[in-house]
Image (tube, rainbow, N blue to C red):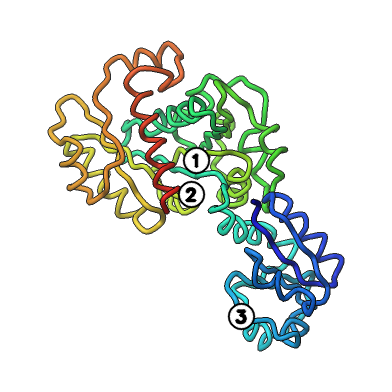
């Protein structure tokens, strides 16, 4: 059953603006002008949106305070702030400028209703293999009959499209979405992106030296959550990754089992801890003296998976094979995907 949103307003402009945002989420929308006739819906709806024109009418109708009430305004309308506080509104969102903020609020509660899972993957040190794992996790999703998106959030990485052999595929790159400030239609987003091996890809174009457009990151990720079953962000180790990590439901830290790799990973953990739940993927390397449990203790992280050293993987990537299409990495990613999906279902 789809999540429901109640909109209380008599303003046709606000109605059209809210309807556009709610349509992106796939929710059902009920619009009422008089809150006195919507007491049952007020209590039952997953979210309530109140137009600035209807705040006093809601209070006069004696509606009860409840969570997830948002006030929306259009233009430069003055708000009766004492009444806003009395209503118990959690946020005031100006429209259309705040479409992305409103979409994010609705997506937060819609998450339990089947919105896509957003997973970040970051390397604890250079060469840890985070980009390879991110692509392989998407291929595991394809095997599980899910619709995945590999989202490139590391301008200095190897390139999400290159890893999957989609560097020459037609479709949108980050440069085409750099000016996005609000919700995107999920179907349009899927249709715009290139695809390879069943995985949609949103990549940075390395040819023009483009940086990741951080202002567009939140609305694009929020829209992608509604367009795909799984969104995997290949995160940078630079400080800019903190904002991208905050958009994730869980972040997988790939750390190598050697002292240098573990020391570097500890710095990454300290920077990202608190932004999103962190899980460790321990990767064994020749000469490394730390196994998975020892690395988990070193970093004080719960373990998600162990990746043994696979000397055939580099040769496979050099041949242009998609990472994780088969072999040991594929098995680990199948198990890892099942684990993160199961953790989300149990939450």
At x 77%, y 63%, the residue is 30
Q: Residues within 10 Å of mark 2 (few under 14, many from 20)?
A: many
Q: Residues within 10 Å of mark 3 (few under 14, many from 20)?
A: some
Measure the C-alpha gap from mark 1 to mark 3.
40 Å
Q: Return the residue nearer the eye: 185 or 289.
A: 185
Query: How far across and down, in percent of the image, does residue 46 sit?
Result: 62, 63
- Mark 2, residue position: 244
Mark 3 or 2: in front is 3
- Viewer-nearest of labels 1 and 3? 3
Q: CA distance from mark 2 to mark 1?
A: 7 Å
Residue 65 is labelled as 3
Q: Which mark is residue 153?
A: 1
Task: Say which element carries label 1.
Answer: strand
Tally of marks: 3
Residue 223 picture location, percent across and down: 63, 47
Q: Earlier in the sequence, mark 2 or mark 1?
A: 1
Label 2 close to label 1 by CB (< 8 Å): yes
- Residue situated in front as seen by the camera: 82 or 10: 10
Q: Position of residue 53 (x, y in %)?
A: 80, 78
The local secondary structure at tag 2 comes to helix
Q: Earlier in the sequence, mark 1 or mark 3?
A: 3
Q: Nearer the viewer, residue 189 or 40?
A: 40
The residue positioned farthest toward the left in the image shown: 289
């Amino acid at each position: 059953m789809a999540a429901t949103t109640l909109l209380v307003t008599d303003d046709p402009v606000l109605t059209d603006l809210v309807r556009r945002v709610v349509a992106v989420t796939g929710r059902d929308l009920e619009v009422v002008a008089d809150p006195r006739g919507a007491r049952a819906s007020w209590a039952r709806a997953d979210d309530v949106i109140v137009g600035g024109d209807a705040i006093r009418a809601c209070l006069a109708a004696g509606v009860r305070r409840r969570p997830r009430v948002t006030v929306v305004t259009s233009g430069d309308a003055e708000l009766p702030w004492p009444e806003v506080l009395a209503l118990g509104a959690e946020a005031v969102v100006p429209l259309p400028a705040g479409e992305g903020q409103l979409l994010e609020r609705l997506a937060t509660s819609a998450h339990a209703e089947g919105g896509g899972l957003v997973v970040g993957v970051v390397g604890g040190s250079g060469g840890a293999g985070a980009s390879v794992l991110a692509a392989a996790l998407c291929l595991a999703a394809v095997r599980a009959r899910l619709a995945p998106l590999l989202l490139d959030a590391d301008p200095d990485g190897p390139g999400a499209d290159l890893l999957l052999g989609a560097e020459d595929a037609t479709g949108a790159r980050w440069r085409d979405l750099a000016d996005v400030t609000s919700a995107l239609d999920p179907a349009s987003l899927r249709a715009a992106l290139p695809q390879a091996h069943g995985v949609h890809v949103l990549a940075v174009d390395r040819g023009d030296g483009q940086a990741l457009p951080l202002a567009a990151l939140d609305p694009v990720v929020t829209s992608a959550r509604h367009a795909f079953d799984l969104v995997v962000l290949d995160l940078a180790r630079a400080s800019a990754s903190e904002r991208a990590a905050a958009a994730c439901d869980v972040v997988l830290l790939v750390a190598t089992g050697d002292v240098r790799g573990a020391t570097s990973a500890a710095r990454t953990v300290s920077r990202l801890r608190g932004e999103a739940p962190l899980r460790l993927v321990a990767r064994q390397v020749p000469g490394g003296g730390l196994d998975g449990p020892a690395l988990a203790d070193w970093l004080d992280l719960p373990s998600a998976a162990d990746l043994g050293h696979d000397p055939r993987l580099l040769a496979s990537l050099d041949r242009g094979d998609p990472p994780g299409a088969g072999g040991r990495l594929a098995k680990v990613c199948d198990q890892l995907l099942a684990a993160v999906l199961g953790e989300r279902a149990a939450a």
